[in-house]
Image: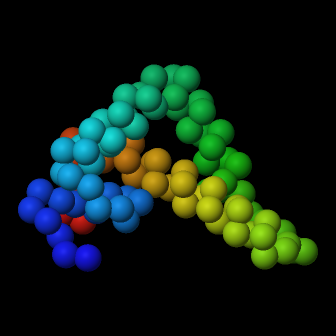
Amino acid sequence: MAKSPGAARGPDNVQRSVEMEHHLNECASICFRDKAGEVLLDHLRSITVMKAQSPPLDSLTLAHAEGARWLVAVLIQRIELGRKGLPPLGK
């Protein structure tokens, strides 16, 4: 897919306008900037990114766990980009 002017790919690898990417990043950083947001983000990390899966593990359970990890990782990237006011990753 050709990049259109003013388009960028965010942490989720979806092409959107630069303005929309900035908006999504800003929204993520606002949602998680206070103590309650930090507590929730720490909890999400603990049940996804930091959780080791143990055998026996069927492929559907593993796919679900990896999808959850990916989603939390995207959220963390958006929060950091929003806090730093950085442009989208794939600009």
Q: Can see residue 11?
A: yes
Foreground pick, 51 / 82: 82
Seen at 37% across and 47% down, the residue is 78
Report if residue 89 is visible in the image. no
Question: Image check: 67 left or right of 58?
Answer: left
Please tell me in which quadrant of the rendered image residue 41 appears: top right
Left/right of residue 29 with respect to residue 76 in the rendered view: left
Is residue 89 depicted above or below 38 in this figure?
A: below
> Residue 48's x, y, as percent?
66, 54
Residue at 12 percent of width and 57 percent of height: 6
Front-most of 53 and 23? Answer: 23
Residue at x 44%, y 29% (from the top left corner): 31
Q: Is residue 81 above or below residue 34?
A: below
Extreme-left residue of the structure: 5
Placement of the C terminus among the 4 image quadrants: bottom left
Location of residue 15 in the rendering, given as x and y in whole percent from the top left corner = 29, 62
Residue at the farthest top position: 35
Q: Is residue 53 above or below residue 32?
A: below
In the displayed structure image, the side of residue 62 where residue 69 appears, left or right:
left
Residue 87 position, x and y percent, is: 19, 52
The furthest residue to the right: 56
State the quadrant of the N terminus.
Answer: bottom left
Q: So how many labels did they put on this image? A: 0
* Picture colour scheme: rainbow
**To which quarter of the image does residue 49 belong?**
bottom right
Residue at 9%, 62% (x, y): give it. Answer: 5
Question: Which percent across, then down, holds residue 58?
Answer: 84, 74
- Where is residue 55, by image quadrant? bottom right
